[in-house]
């Protein structure tokens, strides 16, 4: 019976709830990974997507961590939300809820045992063993959601083959498929099997906590009884702790209806927030966007609301749902009120039992309500506005949750459309902005096949013995690099300063970051961060050579990263005083293995590089020439922990053509 790779399976609603919460609160990758890893259905969904044709013929995923890095938080959030919606379609009865809970406990126990054994026996990838432990009995989960008795029995009888076929379809490799296929083999038959096959088979037996599992541990890995029982005790304690943290009862009868109702409410609130926002048509100033959304917030919460926007050091009342509003402006500095508290802490603030300040009393009077809740809108660590809601003591937690979901969605939309400051630009500037966006999309579409062609050339080159043919392929690859650089520069050809005019380095880095992410970081296994300083970063140089420098160095940094993943970071600093002169500093750092000694000795000269025989190595020589032409300085620091290029560009004063 053929199984589709992207199979829809039920999860415990408590796990889905916790995963959604982690995404809403923007928790760390590690936290999200730990939650997802504890559910077979979510692991199956994330593997199916991460190894789908969407990402092309790239390296296979061996852990949930790798899959999350490839997908990214936002895409994963969508995946969880979709899985939660489908979860509502599974109609499970009392016995089926019990079976689902017991399945979850056994799968998690097997997975934790597999990881512990992998570490103990020095298997190089314990996370892979954990993931396969979660998937080993996926056939039982398929049977649970299958109404036909005959088909259900088929899935129960062929669990090992079903798991093997699915693992193979996800591209996890033949050994991983064998670990699924031979999990029920007798211990005596496994003595000389591959390491991973032995790990999964023994883990499934130890998860049952019986004498047969203890004996199998001695036969397969030579583990004594005392050590094996200690592993069982530790894993049992870990599973209990995980269940408690998720609110899943292990000893009492289990019924997932309560958690399912809660999940349904959260999904409905999320859908309501998305529907109510309707910001796709906004192209105006950020204050206009904030002002228009106050009605949507009242629609969701059923409560009167005020919208305050930031104007320099003040908060100004922009709109409300209470009718005509007075002219109202106040200092944004902390003053004890819930409004200024929410603005400055960037977190929701309640009036509660505290004594209201004069501002609190004014807001209560405007809203005609006994209490008050303030919820900030936070975009890129800034707070462009705050909503004040008139509340009472009933259902305050739910109100805060719904308002927070709403403001998060609003912040994402404001970031997406780059509304900040756009209201002061003329229509022609807006047209140019739209044209640049269209150009960016076209560049992205062209860059994708160039990247794929480049990867195939690399793979073909590694299979050829003829050095002259390899050199010809390297010439083609160099030309593809040059074409890619030109495309990246074209995407910004309509913006930036003219030749001879000062350039804002922070602005250029922010402009380049999105196109670099789309072109060089699409696989998801590499992280890219731009960290601008808070001080002005005007440099006495035109934008075009700066872009060429950054594109060359970032591309080199990405190519130096290992297949397992890594990070590239751009950081600006200003002002920097050196050699009796003010400079603006740009650092480009990667977490690769460092530059080899033979390359370091002639770093900025056109030489052979680590990219392969025949590569001209012109990128760094061009960078050096461009920086020299701008009277700048470049230095390199490299080691086993990575490489940093430090660039100093002459600072420009605020007066035209007046440098330090």
Image (cartoon, grey):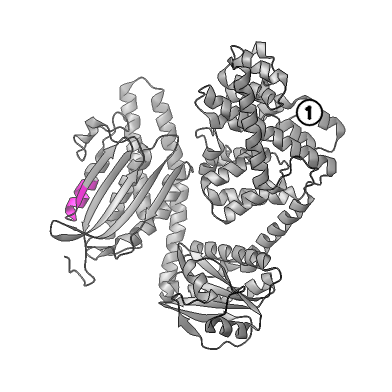
Residue visible at 66% across and 80% down in the picture: 370
Crowding at dot 1, Cα within 10 Å, few <14 / some 14-19 / many 20+, comes out as some
Residue visible at 53% across and 21% down in the picture: 121
Quadrant the C terminus occupies: bottom left
Residue visible at 50% across and 61% down in the picture: 416
Please tell me whether residue 178 belongs to the stretch shown in magenta.
no
Compared across the picture, whether 189 is left or right of 347 comes to right
| Quadrant of the rendered image containing residue 640 | top left
Against 524, residue 312 (above or below) is: below
Residue 234: % across, % down: 62, 31
Quadrant the N terminus occupies: top right
Residue 18: % across, % down: 64, 50
Residue visible at 43% across and 51% down in the picture: 443
Q: Which residue is mark 1?
A: 156
| Quadrant of the rendered image containing residue 180 | top right
Residue 183: % across, % down: 67, 21
| Magenta residue span | 623-634
């Amino acid at each position: 019976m053929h199984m589709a790779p992207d199979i829809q399976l039920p999860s415990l609603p408590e796990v889905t709830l916790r995963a959604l919460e982690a995404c809403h609160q923007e928790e760390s990758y590690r936290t999200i990974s730990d939650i997802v890893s504890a559910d077979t259905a979510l692991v199956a969904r994330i593997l199916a997507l991460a190894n789908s044709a969407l990402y092309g013929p790239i390296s296979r995923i061996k852990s949930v961590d790798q899959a999350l890095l490839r997908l990214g938080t936002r895409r994963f959030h969508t995946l969880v939300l979709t899985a939660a919606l489908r979860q509502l379609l599974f109609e499970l009865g009392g016995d089926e809820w019990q079976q689902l809970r017991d399945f979850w406990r056994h799968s998690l126990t097997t997975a934790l045992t597999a990881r512990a054994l992998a570490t103990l026996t020095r298997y190089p990838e314990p996370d892979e063993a954990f993931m396969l432990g979660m998937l080993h009995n996926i056939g039982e989960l398929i049977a649970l959601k299958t109404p036909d008795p005959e088909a259900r029995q088929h899935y129960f009888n062929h669990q090992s083959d079903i798991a093997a076929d699915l693992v193979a379809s996800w591209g996890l490799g033949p050994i991983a498929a064998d670990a699924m296929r031979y999990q029920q083999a007798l211990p005596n038959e496994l003595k000389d099997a591959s390491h991973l096959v032995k790990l999964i088979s023994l883990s499934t037996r130890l998860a049952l906590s019986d004498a047969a599992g203890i004996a199998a541990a001695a036969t397969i890995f030579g583990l004594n009884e005392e050590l094996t029982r200690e592993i069982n005790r530790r894993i049992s304690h870990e599973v209990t702790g995980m269940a408690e943290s998720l609110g899943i009862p292990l000893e009492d009868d289990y019924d997932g209806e309560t958690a399912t109702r809660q999940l349904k409410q959260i999904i409905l609130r999320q859908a309501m927030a998305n529907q109510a926002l309707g910001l796709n048509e906004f192209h105006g100033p950020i204050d206009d966007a904030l002002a228009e959304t106050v009605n949507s917030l009242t629609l969701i919460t059923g409560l009167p609301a005020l919208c305050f926007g930031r104007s320099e050091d003040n908060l100004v009342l922009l709109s409300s749902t209470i009718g005509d509003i007075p002219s109202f402006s106040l200092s944004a500095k902390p003053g004890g009120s819930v409004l200024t508290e929410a603005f400055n802490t960037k977190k929701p603030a309640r009036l509660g039992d505290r004594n209201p300040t004069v501002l609190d009393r004014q807001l209560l009077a405007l809203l005609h309500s006994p209490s008050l809740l303030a919820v900030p809108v936070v975009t890129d660590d800034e707070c462009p506005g705050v909503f004040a809601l008139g509340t009472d003591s009933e259902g305050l937690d739910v109100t805060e949750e719904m308002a927070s979901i709403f403001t998060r969605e609003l912040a994402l939309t404001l970031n997406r459309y780059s509304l900040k400051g756009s209201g002061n630009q003329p229509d022609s500037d807006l047209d140019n902005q739209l044209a640049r966006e269209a150009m960016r999309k076209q560049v992205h579409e062209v860059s994708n096949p160039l990247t794929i062609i480049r990867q195939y050339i690399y793979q073909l080159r590694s299979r050829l013995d003829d050095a002259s043919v390899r050199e010809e392929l390297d010439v083609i690859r160099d030309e593809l690099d040059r074409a890619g650089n030109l495309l990246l520069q074209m995407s910004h050809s309509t913006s930036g300063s003219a030749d001879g005019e000062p350039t804002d380095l922070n602005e250029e880095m922010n402009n380049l970051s999105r196109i670099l992410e789309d072109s060089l970081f699409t696989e998801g296994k590499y992280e890219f961060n731009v960290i601008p300083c808070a001080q002005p970063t005007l440099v006495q140089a035109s934008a075009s050579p700066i872009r060429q420098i950054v594109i060359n160095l970032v591309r080199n940094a990405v190519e130096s990263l290992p297949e397992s993943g890594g990070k590239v970071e751009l950081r600006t600093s200003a002002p920097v005083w050196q050699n009796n002169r003010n400079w603006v500093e740009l650092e480009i750092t990667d977490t690769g293995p460092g530059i080899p000694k033979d390359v370091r000795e002639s770093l900025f000269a056109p030489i052979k590089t680590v990219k392969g025989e025949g590569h001209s190595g012109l990128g760094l020589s061009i960078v050096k020439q461009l920086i020299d032409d701008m009277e700048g300085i470049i230095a390199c620091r490299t080691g086993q922990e990575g490489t940093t290029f430090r660039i100093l560009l002459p600072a420009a004063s605020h007066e035209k053509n007046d440098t330090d």
